[in-house]
Amino acid sequence: MRRFQKIIIGILIGSSAYAGDPPPEFRTPSGDSILVLETFEYPEQLGRFPGNWEGRVGWRHKKTKKKEDLYYTIQAENGDHFLRAETVGGSTNAGRAAKIKGRNINLRVFKKFRWRWRVYNLPEGGDESRKKKNDSAAAVRLVFKGRLFIPKTLKYVWSATLPAGTETESPQHENTKVIVLQSGSKNTGKWIWEEVNAYEDYKRVFGSDPRLVGAVAVLTDSDDTKTPVKADYDDITFLMEPPDSSKADALHEVRGEKK
């Protein structure tokens, strides 16, 4: 029997030693308030490209099944399975449909987006704001259904050179907005958890409410810098935003109620 979702296990046993546990400061809701999209728990696919994912290449993001393009493979470490990307000169977006029980994910409900990643090698001089240097050590992309079949993409990156907090636009796709979460080699070789309010990020960079999330994709590439890159991805999850306790307290005060 396949292991139960790793994040949920971590919550239940409360172990801080397991790499799959979110940090203590992350608040993880229970039940229907959390949607675990992907944990890569496919031991039967060890060393292979995950069967429920697909690779896309080129500016038109055409599907590919070429072995040299599918450099993302399931790997294992201490009983934990994850997705590894390793290439020199490759540029393939690997992704899957953002569906749970046949329904696309709505960021208006599940506003928080969480995952963990680990980078080993960064593309030398990689800069997501420059067309000729547009390589990322690691990137996680939310692809939204758009009008006239033109999708919009929110791209979170671990950049080789751009400072954390940088927000820019892809030099290749004006409908792709880039947000830098990690920068440089300080944390290479370490699993780093990320949690963002993807709903608020989308509204800020696109100036409108998001449509449904059509797909989640990852990208580790070096087609511009032609240098070795290597990164791992795991535990891709959507969560409902916890209630704002300060607003609830204010409402109680207005009503003259005791907490």
Image (spheres, helix red, strand yellow):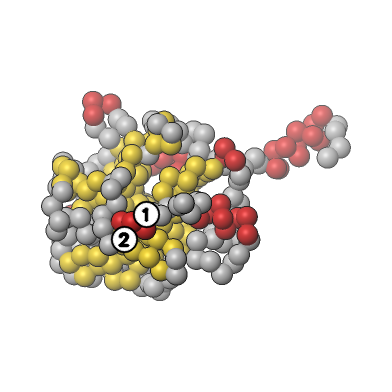
103 to the left or right of 225:
right
Q: Tell me the amino acid under the disc marked 1.
A: Tyr
Residue 96 position within the rendered picture, expressed as x and y whole percent measured from the top left:
31, 43
Which residue is rendered at x = 60% and y = 45% of the image? Answer: 29
Residue 234 position within the rendered picture, expressed as x and y whole percent measured from the top left:
41, 57
Which residue is rendered at x = 22% and y = 43% of the image? Answer: 173
Q: Looking at this view, is 208 or 67 the one in front?
A: 67
Q: Quarter holding the C terminus?
A: top right
Is residue 239 something one can see in this rendering?
yes
Q: Tell me the amino acid under the disc marked 2.
A: Leu
Residue 66 position within the rendered picture, expressed as x and y whole percent measured from the top left:
13, 52
Q: Neighbour class for label 2 at 10 Å: few (<14), some, many (≥20)? A: some
> Which residue in the structure is indicated by mark 1?
42
> Which residue in the structure is indicated by mark 2?
46
The reply to whether callout 1 and callout 2 are in contact (CB within 8 Å) is yes
Which residue is rendered at x = 56% and y = 69% of the image? Answer: 17
112 to the left or right of 56:
right
- Please tell me whether residue 69 is drawn above or below residue 183 in the rendered image: above
Q: Neighbour class for label 1 at 10 Å: few (<14), some, many (≥20)? A: some
Q: Looking at this view, is 1 or 165 the one in front?
A: 1
